[in-house]
Amino acid sequence: MRELQFAIPVRIVPVLGLPVEEIYGVDQAMDFLAEWSTGKQGKLYQAAFNACFGASVGVASAEEACRAFAIFCRVSGILARDMMPPRKGGDKVQGVPL
């Protein structure tokens, strides 16, 4: 199960005014994404969900899932201000430009 942990937790503020939450791995990210409002699910949501699901079944790495989830959080406006941005490597997640 250790291989599904993120090297650095993704720090988010899902509700303004509440404390920062840390997402430590693929399973926790998938749980968070499952609770995301259906009306707010778009291409980046789907890319993050697919990357996390792919990591959970062994066809993607936890690092890929972490990057996709962090980008989704950043674009959605819930990434904590003190969180490092995802590594540079092109501004695309599974072909979706940012």
Image (tube, rainbow, N blue to C red):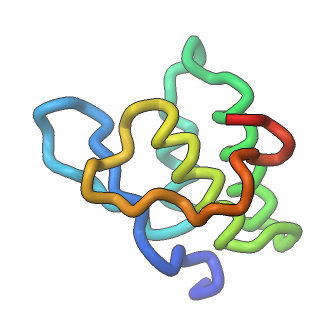
Q: How many marks?
A: 0
* Residue under the point 65% across and 52% down: 68
Frontmost residue, 50 versus 63: 63
Left or right: where 48 falls relative to 31 = right
> Where's residue 13, x and y in %?
28, 42
* Residue under the point 75% across and 66% down: 55
> Where's residue 45, x and y in %?
65, 34
* Residue under the point 53% across and 74% down: 6
- In this rendering, the answer to whether 75 lies above or below 53 is above
Frontmost residue, 42 versus 58: 42
Left or right: where 96 falls relative to 98 = right
- In this rendering, the answer to whether 78 lies above or below 1 is above
Q: Quadrant of the C terminus?
A: top right
> Where's residue 25, x and y in %?
52, 68
Left or right: where 61 falls relative to 73 = right
Left or right: where 42 falls relative to 57 = left
- In this rendering, the answer to whether 49 lies above or below 45 is below
Frontmost residue, 35 versus 82: 82
Q: Residue furthest bottom?
A: 2
* Residue under the point 75% across and 73% down: 61
> Where's residue 59, x and y in %?
88, 68
Q: Quadrant of residue 83?
A: bottom left
Q: Quadrant of the N terminus?
A: bottom right
